[in-house]
Amino acid sequence: MPAQKKSVVMPSRKAKNIYENWKVYSKHGKLMFRCNQRKAQWYLTRELATIKDNEERAIQLNFDAKGQGHAEDDYMVEDRDNICVICGLTDSLTLHHVVPYVYRQWFPLTIKSKSSRDLLLVCKNCHDQHERYATSFKKNLATKYELPLEGKGWVRVPENRTARKAASALLRAADKLPSQRKQELETIVKDFWERKKQEISTMEAIQTAKKDKEEKEACNDDESVDWQALNWQEVLQKCCELQELFQGPDFIEHGQGVVRHLMVNETVDDNNGKERWPDLEDFVKEWRQHFLDHSKPKHLSERWTVDGEIYTH
């Protein structure tokens, strides 16, 4: 007969608390890391851990964990206060990415999953102030790597802009335009409309020639079909919605391009055989130092350092 599961009673928590400071000990009694109540409950309900006696908000794993956890004096194992690390306020708190998400989302998993070290609690006011400095830093990176913040590889379609401006003028003030100017604008839109209908006819001819059903479906363009069915007023409205810029086949986001550049220099750690990216490591440290230099946090643990762990291994 299986042993009856004991109900686990969790201490109450304040809804505003982001850090809940649950300690997680290894099977052999080593403090490995801290987590929130939800994660602690996950271990307990699956009987992967038990409540640690004589210690508040602490669980002990009952299996041998793969990793060794963090060092005893590491930032990741200490209690954290639910206050802004910059000014000390306790209201309107948010988790701030020291390394902006625009870059971190492209990091390899062995770095990205370590993000909790570079997620710091700040108030909204301090966050907004720091973002101004962060934006300036991003602009410098955009220049350094020749990768605009809006991305690289946009394709411009000038005729869309011309048709949009003409249609907008006709919809906005057709009755106030001189007759000749109105006619010129109408000609611009009509010529554009005619080209669109011709494109549809060409597309349909290609589809008819194709025998493979999937290829036919791939060539079908719902937006193109609309152009043949539209009346004049609908054409004007449609033209007003035209975009001039499109992401081309070689388009790359700013953060993606920067991280790709930083990962070119790849090495292997002699101690554990794991991949390393020295340039990416320096990049993370740059952002950490940038945060310290510009926000000057008065309530950040001394254990949080620029040279703190970057990899999960």
Image (spheres, helix red, strand yellow):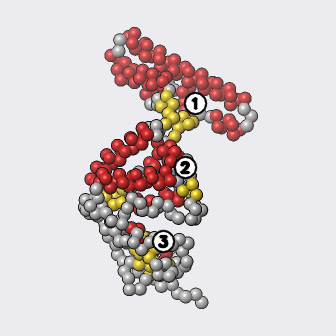
The residue labelled by disc 3 is 69
Which mark sits nearer the N-terminus, 1 or 3?
A: 3
- Asked if 255 appears above or below 176 in the picture, the reply is below
Residue 217 is tagged as none
Residue 200 in sight in this render: yes
Amino acid carrying label 1: it is: Val
Instruction: Give whichever of 24, 174 is nearer the camera.
Output: 24
Quarter of the figure that contains the N terminus: bottom right
- The residue drawn where x is 31% and y is 68% is 81
Instruction: Give whichever of 117, 40 is nearer the camera.
Output: 117
- Asked if 270 appears above or below 99 in the picture, the reply is below
Instruction: Give whichever of 153, 258 is nearer the camera.
Output: 258
Q: CA distance from mark 1 to mark 2?
A: 49 Å
- The residue drawn where x is 37% and y is 45% is 137
Q: How many marks?
A: 3
The residue labelled by disc 2 is 265
Q: CA distance from mark 1 to mark 3?
A: 59 Å
Q: Quadrant of residue 197?
A: top right
Q: Nearer the viewer, mark 1 or mark 2?
A: 2
Q: Nearer the viewer, mark 2 or mark 3?
A: 2
Q: Residue furthest top?
A: 180
Q: Are marks 2 and 3 in contact (CB under 8 Å)?
A: no
Q: Secondary structure at mark 1?
A: helix
How far from the left and from the top, in percent, is residue 199? Answer: 60, 24
Q: Dot 1: within a 10 Å radius of its alpha carbon, few (fewer than 14), some, or many (20 or more) residues?
A: some
- The residue drawn where x is 38% and y is 41% is 139
How far from the left and from the top, in percent, is residue 310? Answer: 46, 60
The residue labelled by disc 1 is 225
Amino acid carrying label 3: it is: Gly
How far from the left and from the top, in percent, is residue 128? Answer: 30, 50
Q: Dot 2: within a 10 Å radius of its alpha carbon, few (fewer than 14), some, or many (20 or more) residues?
A: few
Q: Residue furthest bottom?
A: 1
